[in-house]
Image (spheres, rainbow, N blue to C red):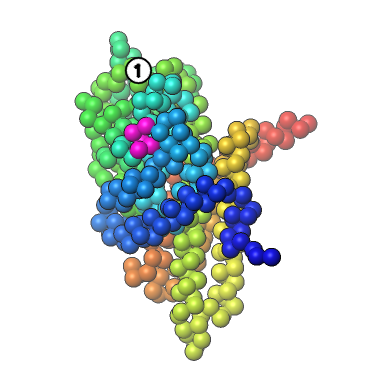
């Protein structure tokens, strides 16, 4: 009996369509992302040319439902896309996923009219968007946000600053979270769609980051910025926190998938190097210390992939504990990517510490996975909260 080369296909029951999509993305990544990644990283340059190729291949559509112009393959398509693109370059992957992250509040909370207006240009790749939740003083502590949106006739007047926004500057529009009722705390947050070019809306400087350098990151600055009231997501005030939490439940499995791709990319480079590099007259892959490092890396990657796909299936099924599973997958896969990328550098020795090989880029890129969309510590808070709630309901 022949055995499928990829156990992932067997165990995770990828459909024919999903396998086809994965193979298409692999080709684009091999031909367009991997050859460009070092230059994009060095120049700190947004991957516009790469995105043109993604658009030609119809890859933006993989992120969206059919009724808004996408392929309608569900969350699994985002997972596959995230893993495969991050395998080549997490910077490109982050820039790509930022547009999905920005769209999610509209997808999970928007009116049918808002979905029809804002999502199709994203699915075709004609426009991109971004997600503005974090603020200088409100990172993990989302309820501490101070940006305000005050209703004035048929407009909302926005004031405040958003921090570390992926895609800022390039994105055509932004889902921005602001207080519409400060007294109500988290129940006073709303989400608004703000277009680039709106008077009173400007950007901070481009951040000079450790890794994912081709994904641009900037502040969003709002100074008496007037936004049409019809841009209030869902048309209802003070439910923005629900949109934000739902968004993160769906986006975290994709971040986990990006972590799996990053880890696999770092691993594949390291094992090839170990098979080629000779010391003491033998290949370093023959040393048990190196073999055990490779085995540990592979075990963690396999476990991360299984958790990631499981969390995605849970989200697709709308399982009630999907927040916990999204957090488990994101935390475990992010920590794995960092550990694997670190061991990757170790296997390369001194060469891994230079830009001659991709090991150092995987290492620099991997760190962000433990920080954005909720740090690893915040994921553990979320997991523990879910576990304690479950335990209480069993009594
Ligand atoms: C490159 C990059 C891109 C980003 N892209 C976006 C984006 O597109 N949109 C967006 O809205 N945001 C974005 N972010 C923001 C990101 O989600 C936040 O940086 C992250 O949530 C952490 O917030 P913080 O940086 O303020 O850290 P802090 O919240 O200040 O955390 C500092 C440290 O304290 C720990 N900590 C904080 N609170 C707790 C707690 N309760 N329990 C245990 N430990 C705790 C954290 O784990 C961390 O180790 C991005 C960030 C970066 C760096």
Quarter of the image with the N terminus in it: bottom right
Residue 80: x and y, percent? Answer: 49, 49
Residue in the picture at 58% in, 37% down: 315
- Which residue is denoted by mark 1 in the rendering? 230
Q: Residue at x 28, y 29 (%)?
A: 195
The answer to which of 246 and 353 lies nearer the viewer is: 246
Viewer can see residue 305 = yes
Percent from the top left, x then y, of residue 196? 26, 31
Q: Quadrant of residue 176?
A: top left
Q: Could you tell me which residue is drawn at 59 percent across and 55 percent down?
A: 8
The picture places residue 158, in percent across and down from the top left corner, at 30, 23
Seen from the viewer's position, the closer of residues 160 and 306 is 306
**Is residue 165 in view?**
no
Residue 384 as seen in the image, left or right of residue 226: right
Please report the residue visible at 49 percent of the width from the left and 51 percent of the height from the top.
20
Q: Which residues are magenta?
A: 120-124
């Amino acid at each position: 009996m022949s055995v499928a080369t990829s156990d992932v296909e067997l165990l995770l029951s990828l459909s024919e369509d999903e396998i086809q999509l994965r193979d298409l993305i692999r080709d684009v990544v091999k031909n367009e992302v991997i050859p460009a990644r070092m230059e994009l990283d060095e120049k700190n340059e947004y991957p516009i040319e790469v995105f043109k190729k993604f658009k030609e291949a119809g890859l933006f559509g993989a992120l969206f439902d059919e009724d808004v112009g996408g392929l309608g393959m569900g969350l699994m398509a985002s997972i596959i896309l995230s893993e495969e693109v991050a395998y080549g370059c997490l910077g490109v992957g982050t820039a790509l996923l930022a547009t999905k992250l920005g769209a999610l509040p509209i997808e999970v909370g928007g009116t049918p009219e808002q979905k029809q207006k804002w999502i199709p240009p994203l699915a075709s790749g004609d426009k991109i968007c971004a997600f503005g939740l974090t603020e200088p003083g409100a990172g993990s502590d989302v309820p501490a946000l101070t940006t305000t949106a005050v209703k004035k006739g048929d407009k909302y007047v926005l004031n405040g600053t958003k921090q570390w926004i992926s895609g800022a500057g390039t994105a055509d529009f932004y889902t921005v979270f602001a207080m519409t009722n400060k007294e109500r705390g988290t129940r006073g947050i709303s989400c608004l769609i703000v277009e680039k070019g709106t008077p009173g809306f400007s950007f901070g400087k481009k951040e000079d980051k450790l890794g994912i350098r081709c994904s641009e990151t900037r502040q969003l600055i709002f100074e008496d910025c007037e936004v049409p009231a019809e841009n209030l997501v869902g048309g209802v005030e003070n439910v923005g926190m629900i949109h934000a939490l739902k968004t993160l439940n769906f986006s975290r499995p994709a971040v986990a998938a990006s972590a799996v791709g990053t880890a696999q990319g770092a691993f594949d480079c390291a094992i090839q190097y170990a098979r080629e590099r000779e010391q003491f007259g033998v290949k370093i892959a023959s040393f048990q210390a190196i073999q055990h490092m490779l085995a540990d890396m592979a075990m963690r990657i396999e476990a991360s992939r299984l958790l990631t796909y499981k969390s995605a299936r849970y989200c697709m099924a709308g399982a009630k504990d999907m927040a916990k599973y999204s957090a488990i997958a994101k935390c475990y896969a992010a920590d794995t990517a960092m550990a694997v990328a670190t061991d990757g550098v170790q296997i390369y020795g001194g060469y891994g510490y230079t830009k001659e090989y991709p090991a150092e880029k995987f290492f620099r890129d991997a760190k962000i996975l433990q920080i954005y969309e909720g740090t690893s510590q915040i994921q553990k808070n979320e997991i523990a909260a879910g576990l304690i709630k479950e335990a209480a309901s069993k009594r």
